[in-house]
Image (cartoon, rainbow, N blue to C red):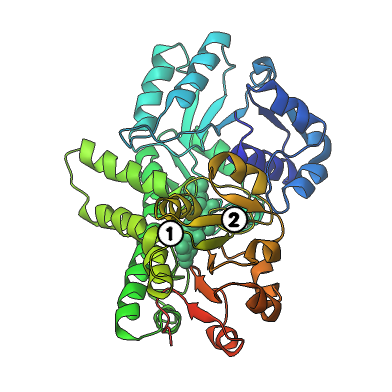
Amino acid sequence: MGAGWVGLVTGACLAELGHEVVVRDVVEDRVRALASGEIPMYEAGLEASVQSAGDRLRFTVDLAEVVDEPRVILVCVGTPAMYSGDADLTAVHGVVRELADVGVPEGTVLAMKSTVPVGTGTTIRKELDDQGLGHVGYVSNPEFLAEGTAVKDFMQPDRVVVGGDDDAAADRVAQLYVALDAPIVRTDVASAEMIKLASNAFLATRISFVNEIANVCDATGADVTEVARGIGLDKRLGPHFLNAGIGFGGSCFPKDVNALKQLAGNSGYHFQLLNAVIEVNELQKRRVVGKLTKHLGPLRGKVVTLLGLTFKPDTDDMREASSLVLASRLIAEGADVRGWDPVAVEQARALLTGVELFSDPVEALADADAAVIVTEWSQIRELPFADVREMMRTPLIVDGRNLLDPAELRKLGFTYEGIGVPSA
Ligand code: UGA
C-alpha cells in the first residue's frame, strides 16, 4: 500500500526475489505512469529492478486487487511530521479503514513498513479488532533503506526486523526475506518500532557529534577528517556516519529524531540528548555563513554559488536539504545566491525562490565571490578548477562536505575553507 519511495523499492525488490507483488496507490496518474514503466523518482537501480521483476510486479488503484487473496499487506504510506513534531498517522489509519470497508480474507497479515511512533501497533491492533478485522495478523517490519542505495540496502541488508505478537503472522512476514543473506531480528511489535526510531536517532547523533568535534577542530587546529579516521578504526565505534559537514537533512533523520523526542516527551521523559542533536544540526546548516563573512566581509551584493542542492548525492530529494536553510539565510544577508545541481534543478525551482538556478556548474561560478559545496556530488570533483579560478571574482571555496583536497585547491590559488579542517 503506497507507491512512494519505500513502497516502490520494496515492491520491486520483493518481486525480484520471486514474490507476486501488487503495488496499490490512490494517485491514478502515478499508477498509470508506473504501469507504463515510468519511475517517478531518481533512485539508483530501481528502474532495472522494476524491469527485471516483469509480470511479478503490478500497479493498481483498485483495492479489490489487494484483498483478492490472503496476502501480506505492507503499509508503505507517508507519516510526515505535524506542527507538534509528532508523526501524522492519517494515511496509516486510512489504510486500516479502507481494508475494514472492503473486508479482507482470513490469513491476511498487515505489516507496517512506514515509520511510526512506538505504541502504534497496539493502537492498530485495537482498530483492527474494533472494525471486524480481528482475523488479520499485525507485524511491525520497519525499513532501513537509505535514498540512493535503497535497492542495495534492500537486497543486502544488515538485518531484517520483524516484530510480531502473533507468531504465525510474524513467520509469514519473515518468510518474505528468507532468500536474503541477513539476520532476521524477531521481536515484539513495540521493540521493532523502537529499533527503527532508535537506529535513525543514533545515526543522527553520530553526525551531530562529529559536527561538534569538527567545530572544536576549527577552533583548535585539528583536522576532523584525520580525527574521524582515527576514531573509526576502533571496532567499538566503527567508521560510518562520521563525515562532518553542514548538517543532516532528508525525509527521515530530521523527522524521526523529532518524533522520538516528542514520543519521549509525551510519555513524560525529557530526551535531553536528542534536543542537543537537533540544535547542533540547525546551527550547523548556518556555519557556512560565518566562514563566508570571514573572507568576504558583509555578504550584501556578494555572489554566492551553492553547488549541490539535494539533501545528499545520488537522489533528487530536496526534503529538509541544508541548501534550503542556507539559501534563505544568505538571501537574508543580502547575497545574490546561485544554485547548481546535476538532477534537482527543476525541483529546486519551486523551493528555492530568489535563487538563480543553473544546469552548468561552471556557468554558475562565473564572476562568483564564493562557491559553497552543499552536497557532495562526485561531479564537483571533476570541475576544471584551474579555469574556474580564473572565472571567479573571488576564488573562495567553502567546502561544506570536506569533499575536495585543500592542498590542491590552494596550489591553484583558491582560498579554501572546510568544516573542521585547518584553513591555512
Ligand atoms: C536514513 C538512514 O540512513 C536509513 O537507514 C533509513 O532507513 C532512512 O533514513 C529512513 O528512515 O527511511 P537517508 O535519509 O536516505 O537514510 O540518508 P542518509 O544517507 O542516512 O543521510 C542522511 C543525512 O545525513 C544526509 O543529509 C547526509 O548528508 C547526512 N550525513 C550522513 C552526514 O552529514 N554525515 C554522515 O557521515 C552521514
The location of residue 107, given as percent across then percent down, is 57, 23
Residue drawn 54% across the image and 16% down it: 99
- Compared with residue 72, is residue 231 higher up or lower down, i.e. above or below? below
Q: Is residue 176 visible?
A: no
Numbered circle sitting on residue 242: none
| Residue 201 horizontal side relative to residue 240, left or right | left
Residue that protrudes farthest toward the front in the picture: 301
The location of residue 192, given as percent across then percent down, is 41, 44
- Report the amino acid beneath label 1: Arg
| Residue 200 horizontal side relative to residue 144, left or right | left
Residue drawn 33% across the image and 73% down it: 215
**Depth check: 44 or 114 in front?**
44
Q: Is residue 162 visible?
A: yes
Instruction: Kindly tell me whether mark 1's CB lies below 8 Å from ligand 1.
Output: no
Instruction: Kindly tell me whether mark 2's CB lies below 8 Å from ligand 1.
Output: no
Please identify the quadrant where the C terminus is shown: bottom left
Residue drawn 60% across the image and 51% down it: 356
Numbered circle sitting on residue 339: 2
Name the N-terminal-most of marks 2 and 1. 1
- Calculate the distance from the C-alpha at mark 2 to the C-alpha at mark 1: 17 Å
Residue labelled with disc 1: 300
**Depth check: 239 or 255 in front?**
255
